[in-house]
Amino acid sequence: MQTKLSVIKKRHQDTQSHEIHQAAVSQGMSTVFERFEAQQPQCGTCKKGLSCQLCSDGPCRISAKAPLGVCGASGDVIVARNLLQLAAIGTAANTYQCSNLANTLKAIGNGRSPLKLRDEGKLLRMCQGLGWDHTKPVKELAVQFADFILNEIGKQSSEPMTLMDLFAVNKRKEVWKEKGLYAGGPSAEVLTALTKCMTNISNDPIDLMNTALRLGLANEYVGLWGITVIQDILLGTPELVKGDANIGCLDGETVNIISNGHQPVFAGHIMEMASRVEFQSAAKKAGAKGIKLYGSLCEGQQLMNVSGQGHNKEIFGGQLGNWIQEELFIATGLVDLFLMDLNCSVPTLKSFADKYGTKLISTDPVVRFTGVEAIDFNPEKADEQAERILKEAIEQFKKRKADKTRVINLQTESKGVECIAGYTTETVLTMFGNSIYTYIDEMKKGNIKGAVAVAGCTNVRRDQGGKSIHRLTLELIKRDIMVIGAGCCSSTHQNLGMSTKEMTKEAGKKLRSVCEKYDVPPVVSYGSCTDVGKILDTVAALAWTIGCDTSDLPVAAAVPEYMEQKAIADIFTALAFGLLTYVSPEPMISGSSLVTKYLTEDMVNLTGGRMLLQEDPVKAADEIEAHIITKRKVIGFDA
Ligand code: XCC
């Protein structure tokens, strides 16, 4: 079907997305960009974090005329309480995913699930690291490890997390202990934090922010750590791989399934089943070339990272992109089935699915859409659930092909963008000759001036949509600073062709020499936003080897297009690690100079970390570079 295209401003950084966006708008759809515009002007008081809706005497909006809420809460308390709530939601979501994974691992260990452990070696190494007898049968260890993680999640606030005890750098642990940040299990920490957010309980904004730092540690030492480790055990530890990214990966002639979200284990199993002869022949009988499963958002990052091991490689169709593109994936008209397993599955997917003939299925009990079928992943029923999904996808493909009025917005000959994926602490070390000392030597010589994690979401405020990620990354590598991407930042890098060795020519002279010598690109992707846990592993490994605190390293964290609550939890993790943490757009804190000053200046005295707020990514790169130069002197890399 032909549509007369409206002329719309180019919001997406890449041309493929812009074209589908233009088509969707012409066909009467609105995407995140149009909805953002429709929301303008947004409330200035809320933007400053100065509104409270907790009690029935509210809502209260703090102003010069009314400096206190009805209950008496000050603007400082309201701002801090609002931010702490976001950190609690983010910590809860990461912990939820971790607990799902532990339960899946346990089901496999107990022989109640057809799923496999693709990296048993990692499980054994972890058990050994915990000081256990790792010569026991692997299934027994799987149950023991799963129970251990579930127990860590449920620890009381007064019981420090074993993982933090074992794996944090000693100097850092002393700081956390001394400052009252040595957190317990995430369930208890979230409980405490949310209780402190209740009306008329905590009236100390600084205590509220320190509570968020405790959440940051619980977020890391069970949530993110557990997610990354168990996912590696279940799906395999990533290996370097050439991948395909962006919407152009979609092949009109295959049965097309998209798996969207953050929990890749079920998708991995669907791919395993899809490679079986019965499903391949059913697809061919329906007139398709085969079955493809594409990853979307962070889930796609994880699936692409493990695609290098060769498991069902022919089924994986590529990594489609970041969250502001997800409606566009469906608007191509080429998607048969769209699975949603956690955030970010936007509510409007339903109207897009109805318009373009896609079937939506939610696969986790927390994801619910009115009028959408749910097949909640159960590791014990994984085979029959995957079978249902594959059969449904093949039926949907038949309908797509039979429907002469179907709107197709993507040319079938479109192509994905090539990228390199699969970086982790392990693969980065392999590139440097299996020696962390080689990496540190290059840092000492100044060939790698420092490293910055550019992680988190994409955002449409100030018309960003990847612009700030792109700009900041270029500025950093130009200054010989290596960039480690994760989350939708990695999608942006991939869509724009930045996750390739080609980028070496954009790097500063010194970094370029390192990239050429070790055959490593200046921008590497660690994967999902949950892989921030792996980035912090690398940071801790550097600090252990150098013998310094994490806060002394010439490194920084950057969330150049912050969007949601898991990012806030991760930001507090980075601050607790003592890192300079660049955040844009600014979280809703400007209504409190006290909270803003604490986060951006005074927190240095507590953890060594601080938040850097800066709209302009070039100026942000200047400040990050200055920080890195200072830290190089602190650890004696420079005089
Ligand atoms: Fe969602 Fe992870 Fe954020 Fe992307 S990066 S917008 S959470 S998909 Ni985490």
Image: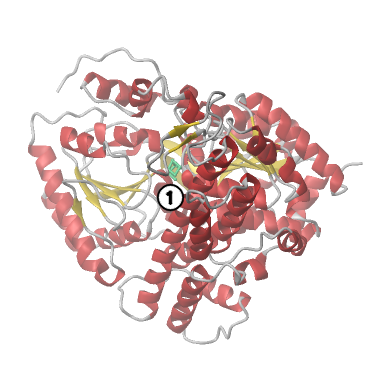
The colour scheme is secondary structure
Residue drawn 39% across the image and 71% down it? 103
- Residue 168: horizontal and vertical position, in percent? 68, 63
Residue drawn 66% across the image and 52% down it? 576
What's the residue type where badge 1 is placed?
Met
Of helix, strand and loop, which one carries label 1?
helix
Q: Is residue 339 visible?
A: yes
- Residue 303: horizontal and vertical position, in percent? 41, 53
Q: In which quarter of the image is ligand 1?
A: top left
Q: Which of 478 and 67 is in front in this view?
A: 67
Q: Nearer the viewer, residue 149 or 300?
A: 149
Residue on which disc 1 sits: 304
Image height of 518 relative to 334, above or below:
below
Left or right of 558? Residue 58 is left
State yes or no: Cβ of the residue under disc 1 lies below 8 Å from any atom of ligand 1.
no
Residue drawn 31% across the image and 12% down it? 7
